[in-house]
Amino acid sequence: MLTPGTRLGPYEILSPLGAGGMGEVYRAKDTKLGRDVAIKVLPEMLASDPERLARFEREARVLASLNHPNIAAIYGVEDSTSVKALVLELVEGPTLQDRIEAGAIPVEEALPIARQIAEALEAAHEKGIVHRDLKPANVKIDPAGNVKVLDFGLAKALDPAVSSSPDLSHSPTLSIGTQAGMILGTAAYMSPEQARGKTADKRADIWAFGVVLWEMLTGRRLFAGETVSDTLAAVLRQEIDWSVLPAGVPPAVRRLLARCLERDPRNRLHDVADARIELDEAQRAGGETAAVPATAPGSRAKSALLPWAVAAAAVAAAVGAIWKARPPRLEVAHLSVALPPGVHLDADTPNQSQIVAISPDGSVVVFRGRGKDAAMLYRRPIGAGEAQPIPGTEDGFDPAFSPNGESLVFCSSGKLRRIAVGGGTPVDLAEDAGCRGTAWGADGTIVFSPTVNSGLWSVPAAGGAPKPLTTLNDAAGERTHRWPEISPDGKTVFFTVGTRDKPGDYDDARIDAVAISGGNRRVVYRGASFLRCLERGEYLLARSGDLLRAHAAAGAEIRDAPVPVIRGIGGDPRSGVAFVAAARNGTLAAIFGVSTHDTDEIAAIDRTGKISPTAIGPGQYDSLALSPDGRRLAIAEGPGGGRNTNIWIVDIADGNALQLTSDGKAGSSRWAPDGKSLVYSPTAGDALFRMAADGRGVRETLCQFTDSVPISVDSFDPGGATLLVTRYGLTGHRADVDAIAMAGSHAVTPFLATEAPEMNAVISPDGRWVAYTGDYERGQQIYVQAYPTLAGRWQLSRDGGIRPRWSADGTELFYLSGYTMMAAPVRTSPTFSYGESRPLFTIDNPGGSEFTSNYEVAPDGKRFYIIRKKTSPADAGARIDVILHGTDGLKELAR
């Protein structure tokens, strides 16, 4: 912010004028020539890039060649030591937008204004300059009625590169708007070809001219929608209601509008000089009127409906919900983060981890990506360049920036680690860190959620002993605290509270706050997934794909209803926001459409990682259980998260399926050793049921539990006499393994129930050993003990491990380390021994949920059946969108 009296070369800043299309605008005095000018400060990302700045200056020289009374002049580029700025003609008076907001403009007043706009466009087009952002806000009218068109060609001048890419992110308007941090091309005035991401030429200006003229005559928006996506969809397919035009509009003007608003650019008016001629004719004709056409002139564009579907999918996450009570004055554009060839964004759903972070100044995003060999963190500057891997972050997730933006904290291999943003050798901060979110405060404190069933912990960024920050409230049924966010002043930690009655479901969770030094908690909001801080007292809340804006005193309860600023398309949360990281200036890095549950598949993967399709069709898969003969899978199928999920028995070879349950409440399952029955848990987690695998007979209730917590049905002993299950979120222990007797009264006996979490216990084929995940002093690792005595204890994994599986012959133990499938050679006789674990392959786009099994091993140990997302996130629509605007932009959106 420049203060009055600041000098930029010969220019003295007098007062701020507001935010222009490309940055802050000030009234200034040209002390050499004694005139007032407008100073437009260029965005930092442009001013600090010598190549882009040189290109901009070349473009500015071309624009300066425009010498026309209806075009606001560019006087020069001021290059001071602190800022780079444009020196522009100062145009007094209201904008055309201000005039339209006051109501429809009478025909006799509107036509001279339109003619002057056409003359300005004609002069620019003759020099090969396209405006690309014509809208009422870029037109000023002085008290004498003289028109000045502003920001001519600056969209192109600010573009980092001219692209012919059909991708919407390269749209001449949207991409420039996001690069510059403001909206340059309002969606309502974009031509259909711009909305589809195609190259804009002068016919795009003619379309915008038609929209502006229509709005002048009617006093209302031609294309309006609740979101940018809705508005672009209207641009692409909405029939124009010609009956809205006042009866006094001359026939020549109606014909002109019809030709300007032709969606097919080949049929659109080709030269704006013809528009000037039509307007002259209309003014000469005086008050002649004509009937309103019965059919919209743009009806030939109905063939654009199919391309609209494609474009709508492309912009489904282009974000920018506008408060319904008033027409939008600001819209939000996006910049999709470009990934290097062969790298895609991992589609972790938000109940697994955070996979994107943004630097405090909003200039860099870091995200979890997967290259050819392994997953790791990638760094992508927002202004220019492509994403690059960060050495030392292999298998990293849950990144968060340091307050100065120079370092990162992240989780990897069961450890919390610190590293420079450019990469290097990471520093281990905590051993027990199967994270569910990280945050780095202004005082150097790092807050993290170490495991599924844990409160928050803190550790100094410089190193030291981690210590608990929050404690789960067992009496209230809490099972997890996660996704911490530290306030800008570094004093308060906000976090999400997950409960045992809603495992894996955070759409309606509670947000609490606690002092970073510890102490009593307080409720901030009920009914959201997570909270992000902007400036003091300004918050973003995520809920069911929507992003909401709210405000309250620091750490106080949010009492007023939050206002939507981004919505899932059509109310579908899978098309909306899945995860958001926020910079302090309001710039957001958002993941959209990640939870594409309807694109799961069951893949067969060999030991080298080669993927083969199975006969099982795509679906919404939650867990797997392989029959003892390796021919059938019991699959929990449904929308995920334990909602309307049933178990199906599917033949792997031919895909034939039998629906075993029908109440929509089935979760994890396991086959009995003889393959004739299955035991499964309901999603409520309050019982265990047994059913015949052929679907005949009635369901048998094995046992009822007093606690309703997530259950994973893990393993039978070889004789089928005992079943081991994991119960998550239990009071005090967080995860315990129980043994269920399959005969008699089905007694439930604690099997692994120490003060630390133990889970997913599987018994060896010879019945002598049990492997499980223990969350002890080294984080989640794979351990083996004697069964059933639990004598001895061997730690099999070194860099984290979950979900162990024995080979059918008992010579190998498989487990997951991150998303990498590991195999360890083992001996079970005469005693237990093991060799070094080795990686087999990394699972691409894993599916499944937090408490169930997402993979099984074939009896021969050569194939693995794995739930994975059928398409990559880039294909399915999941991506990172960087939404660039200040906090004021969010306030404007929410009004």
Image (cartoon, rainbow, N blue to C red):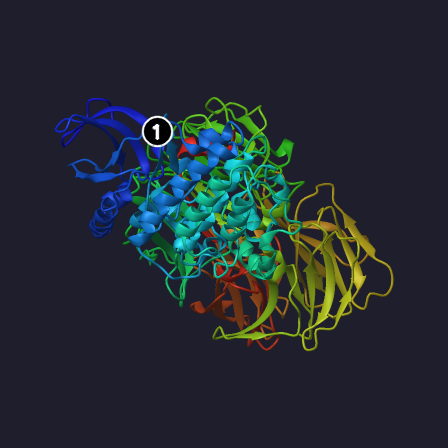
Give left or right: position of 514 versus 768: left
Residue 865: image quadrant is: bottom right
Q: How many marks?
A: 1
Return the x and y of residue 595 as percentages of the image width and height: 57, 53
Kindly give the residue lying farthest to the right in the view shown.
697
- Quadrant in the picture for the N terminus: top left
In the image shown, does 710 or 705 lie closer to the viewer? 710
- Residue that numbered label 1 is attached to: 18
Please, is residue 764 above or below residue 195 in the view? below
The answer to whether residue 875 is visible is yes
Residue 404: x and y, percent? 29, 38
The amino acid sitting under disc 1 is Gly
Residue 190 visible to the viewer? no
Point out residue 643 in the picture as x, y percentages from the top left corner.
70, 49
Give whichever of 682, 21 is nearer the camera. Answer: 21
Q: Quarter-wise, where is residue 29 in the image?
A: top left
The spot of residue 54 in percent (x, y) is 20, 50
* Disc 1 crowd, CA 10 A, few/some/many (<14, 14-19, 20+): few
In the image, residue 310 above or below residue 513: below
Farthest residue, direction left: 32
Check the image and report above or below for 805 versus 190: below
